[in-house]
Amino acid sequence: MSQQAHEVPKVLIADDEPNLRKVLRDMAKRVLRSETWEAADGQEALGLFREIKPDLVLSDIRMPGMDGISLLKAMKQEQPNVPVILITGYPSLEVAIQGMKEGASDFITKPFRLDQLQVILEKALREKRLLEDNEGLKQQVQHKKALEKLNEELNRKVREMSALCSLGQTIAAFPLNRDAILRSLVNETRSAVQAMWVQFLTPHQGGVMTLARSPDQPEGTDVSRAPELPKNLLERALRLRTPILGPRLFLPSDPSAAGGLSKENFSQMVVPLVIKGEVIGVLHAAGKLEGREFDRHDLLLVSELAKRAALGLENKYLYESVFDVLMSTLRSLVSTVEARDLYTKQHSQRVTDIAVIIAGHMGCTPEQIDTLRVAGYLHDLGKLGVKDSVLLKPGPLTPEEFDQIKAHPVIGEEILAPIGFLPEERALVRHHHERWDGKGYPDGLREEKIPLLARILTVADVFDALTSDRPYRPAMSVEKGAAEIVACRGTQFDPAVVTAFMQVLEECAEKVVNRYNGAKREKKEISNG
């Protein structure tokens, strides 16, 4: 490579987005002081590649016509030593592996930061210069070492992309599950940087509390003897809010307790998780495998993992805040419905409690029970759309009046739909008056076509209604109400749900009796007043 090329590298940028090309051009000039050429698609880029013979190529994967992988293959056939960095906004482990196998030097995901790109550009250009400066050295031993290094680099890239993709998949699959996100962060960090120990710590009552720790330790590692994060390093990370490559740690007094590590090879790093300017905890990695040390590249990678986890957790906290406001508003609406009819006060809460008991006995997941808690409380929200003259009528309803009552599940679903409630909750509100034999409303669903949680909610709803006073009849006893439920097994109710209900009848009855007695006392006080 000429001295001039060393001083002014040529960089080719291929991307179909003009704004991104400008950003990459400015970054390349700032970082490498380079000359730059731009292409809007793969075919144009290949022509420029043959014409200018660049020192470095930055290429998007998704482009019209010839995509980034096809462009990579063509360029590597003509000039195998030119480093090609692939860019994408849609990270995929398969694409990353394919790109590396075809000879890509690196892989960067949008959006990226200047320091990330700087490390990658400098590394790619440095590797190209080394390859060209040593092109004449083709001895067998050197060739073998080069292959081993490239293989190690490919394996490292696969680990990195696997960690980023796996963490992203966890965040997408469990966006509201803090523990799942932190477990994934800890596990993927350990895999990506080959650490012996990784843990996530958060400040707690003047000390620290471990929220997640890497569960799969190398053979011979005693997790209980894993080194603690030095207090001064923790305080520094919390104060500076920046990733830190820490000083070496001293091992436990018994070296065998640390999986064979020695004082000479015990490296560590600390990366804070920052949400809205506040450090919520730190990720601590210690003891890199095979006697190596954590380096700047490891620190940048773990920082990227931590940043993505922080974004996922921030979305969780934001969702919970909005959800709490919405639920508070909806609870007020439910209270408005129940205040119209003293006989049904706290009906929604009792129905929810009973449904949760049945669902737990039937082995429903925590996520299903959470859905039931929300939908159970809101199941009669649609009665806001029913006139008082119909809702509180002490005598029999006319067909027209009954049609108004039957509309409340649909009205309830329509109230919830615009505010972004999940389909599961809306489905339970809509279908809690369906029947096992298909004669219910509003859709006449039957048997397994009715959502399981709606079938559970139906039994809880009817049982509470039977054992509560109504304007047109007194409350049934728990025993008689349960007998009515059993009598409708296989017609109105799912037989399996009825069986589960009867097995937990005593616990369900306790909810009804305790709350109902409180309501009776309140009605008596009102009448005496």
Image (cartoon, rainbow, N blue to C red):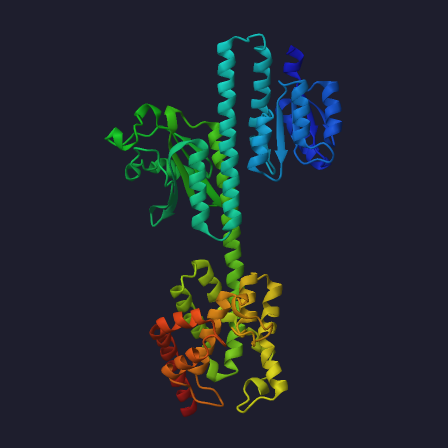
| Percent x, y of residue 519 | 41, 82
Q: Is residue 271 left or right of residue 18?
A: left
Quarter residue 286 falls in? top left
* Quadrant into which the N terminus falls: top right
Front one among 420 and 314 = 420
| Percent x, y of residue 27 | 64, 29
| Percent x, y of residue 164 | 52, 38
Q: Tell me, yes or no, if residue 71 can be seen here.
A: yes
| Percent x, y of residue 264 | 33, 23
* Quadrant into which the C terminus falls: bottom left
Please, is residue 213 above or below residue 15 in the view? below
- Identify the residue at image location x=56%, y=14%: 130
Q: Is residue 79 left or right of residue 315?
A: right
- Identify the residue at image location x=30%, y=25%: 262
Front one among 318 and 450 = 450
Q: Is residue 62 left or right of residue 109?
A: right
How many numbered discs?
A: 0
- Identify the residue at image location x=49%, y=53%: 176
- Identify the residue at image location x=59%, y=18%: 128
Please, is residue 509 above or below residue 295 in the view? below
Q: Tell me, yes or no, if residue 26 can be seen here.
A: no
Please, is residue 116 above or below residue 470 in the view? above
| The residue positioned farthest toward the left in the image shown | 254
